[in-house]
Amino acid sequence: MNDLYKTSHLQYEYVPFPELGHGSQFHTYDTHDGRVLKLPLTKEETYVVVSKRRHNMNPLSSKEIAPLDTRIHTIINGKARIPAMLNHSFYNAKDFLSILGNPTIIDAEKVLPEDRPGKEWGAGRVIYTQDKLTMVGDMLKGFGEQPTLKAGDISKIKQIIDLYIEQTYKLWSYGYADYVFKLGDTGFDTAGNFVLADLGEYSSDPTFMKKALADKRWLHSIIPDKIDFPQIPAQLHDYFAATLNNAFTIEQFMSRWRTQHHCSSCKATDDNVISAFIAAKVAEIDFVDRW
Amino acid sequence: MAKIPEITIQGTVYNYRYIDHGAQFRVYAILTADGKETGRAIKVPLSFEESRHVLAPHLESLEFTDDEIDRRTHALLLRKQQLPSLLQGMYANDKRLMYLLGNLKLVPVLAHPEKSSTEYFMPLHFTQDHVQTMADFMHPFRFVQTPPYHITLQDTRRAKQLMRAIVELHYHLWEYGIFEISFKLENIGIVPHGRNGIQAILVDAAEHTYDAELAEAAIKKQRWYNCLKPEKTDHLFLPTILHKEYSDICNRAFTVEEFRKHWRKRSDVIERRAGRRLWVRQALTRNSKKELSIWIERQTLHNDLHRGMPKDRVDAMLIPHADLRMLLESGHVGDLPLSDIEQQEKAERTMHEGNQDSMLEIYRHTFPTITP
């Protein structure tokens, strides 16, 4: 159902923005105008979410806590990369942003309080709005309760898998890639366009992406133990694995990578020794913050 | 009507006469500038300190620590945030349900207190119909053996009518998958209905759950008995003379069998109908993109039917921001002496505690003889 109430631009006018959900990076709120507001979780909130997801609510052992810290670090870094990606000076920025649900960054420094013990955002001080979507993850959860699927449902889920590949290819052509490959983090806007929704898990590093492709992390969507991945119904496991294994190869990736990346900034820095040095040093961080 | 210490706050457009408070809101009748009733009341959110002040005496009597009381208060403040969900989607579209929630509307203004404060998570104000409070309705039934209160045949009819209306109110909520979990009588208000009838409406809807398991557990615990127990100081105490009638009606009405019969009866029908409509639309479309989009809509229908706030749930009285802020900051919870009604309730609770047998005797000799 669409909201009949629209917020106006009066200074104080407000109708509660209901929380539609949250992952490990952002809370999502419905702003009643066909858009959602994404507010970052604090480091402490992320810790709670991640430890629950990975361990089915059981307390963590001391051995488990160390890798958890690394994972939280990665999650925060993922958020920190968002503004650079969205503000990249593409000539056809509108087309690029439409793949991601037309996100718009909000100046977090003006609205988020300073970090204090117990309430820290760190580098993940990123807030944005985005088109409101009907999430594929929600739909997949609904199918989890059904023992068998109808033929019509099977064909529609196959259609979604095919759209997912199509949109992923499009994103690769701009020089960005989702390294988690979570089909549940996609959705449809009101015009029926398929959108990649989760901006905090993207990389522009082809070397890293080749490793992620070799990991075949999309298969987590058919491994029931991976409780943070909405699961594909069992009847479609073979189709899902075969189609994505075939589509997400290093060869396919390299043939599409940055083919549509036309911008005003990348070339200018290529010849600059200092910029190249900084880029190389900063890239080293990528080897620290992957789990 | 018994005397209540009158506090009226003068606003810039309206005046606000204090009625009462619970643990979550203070309630004021909204009056026009020249003092006329508008028929509406405004619910002003309590701060952390105010809520704690209300909760603490009862929790201290149960030997809760300060930390535990803080945690309970914190949870209560969070629960208050779920109230707008009752004004959305299929709930908002049911006129009768909205009537039973006192025609609750959200004031679309976010009025923070002057100083930045963490005492409020999100200070939401609501308006609702100004109705008779349960404490006021029950007042004539207290100390029935002492003049000037003598209950009449008409009074007993009204009491029974009210109890049946309370049952109907709960049933209607259950049919939408909403369960008022506290069974607090003071959460219910009374409105006249027809020539001699009365209707019960939920004036404090913040204590609800959508979880059937929690609901069944509350039924098995027979929470409606709390208003009969003098030690339950966080519940309005039911006049002793009404105890038996109330117990009989509630015991018959609030059973797991009745719950299962009513639970989600209406909401499931609405969902099935909406699902069928979408199915037809999907079957008729020739555009594959559109078809996929409708199919997705069908899969997420359950959630979608509970979202979206229609305009008529947003208050249109244009209560100024300055008034809301003033109401927010004029916290007088805990400052007021007990009203006549509250004193009488407290007295009856104390009397019942020490004198249960004689009170039951009063019931035996009084209530049945005048019941038709």
Image: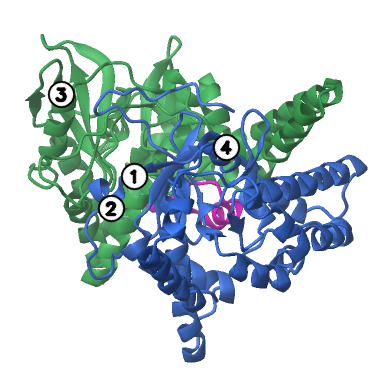
Chain colours: A blue, B green
Judged from the image, the secondary structure of the residue bearing numbered disc 2 is helix
Which residue is identified by label 2?
B352
Viewer-nearest residue: A225 or B144: A225
Disc 1 packing (10 Å; few <14; some 14–19; many ≥20):
many
| Badge 2: residue crowd in 10 Å (few <14, some 14–19, many ≥20) | many
- For image coordinates 54% across by 73% down, the residue present is A57
Both labels 2 and 1 in a single chain: yes
Chain under disc 1: B
- Residue assigned mark 4: A98
Q: The residue marked by circle 2 belongs to what chain? A: B
Query: Cβ–Cβ below 8 Å for labels 1 and 4?
Result: no
Q: Which residue is mark 1?
A: B240
Crowdedness of circle 3 by 10 Å Cα count: few (<14), some, many (20+)?
many
In the rendered structure, the residue with mark 3 lies on which chain? B
Q: Is residue B60 magenta-colored?
A: no
The residue type indicated by label 4 comes to: Ser
The reply to whether label 3 and label 2 mark residues of one chain is: yes
Instruction: Judge from the rendering whether residue A185 lies leftward or rightward of residue B125; answer left or right.
Output: right
In the rendering, which numbered label is found on residue A90?
Answer: none
* Amino acid residing under circle 2: His
Quadrant of the rendered structure where residue B220 is? bottom right
Q: Amino acid at mark 3?
A: Tyr
**Disc 3 or disc 4, which is closer to the eye?**
4
Alpha carbon separation for disc pair 1 and 3: 34 Å
Q: Earlier in the sequence, mark 2 or mark 1?
A: 1
User: Could you say which quadrant of the image residue B312 lies in?
Assistant: top left
Read off the magenta span. B208-226
Residue holding disc 3: B16
In percent of width and height, residue B54 lies at 21, 52
Secondary structure under the numbered disc 3 in the rendered image: strand
User: How dense is the environment of label 4, judged by Cα within 10 Å: few (below 14), some, or many (20 and up)?
Assistant: some
Is label 1 in contact with label 3 (beta carbons under 8 Å)? no
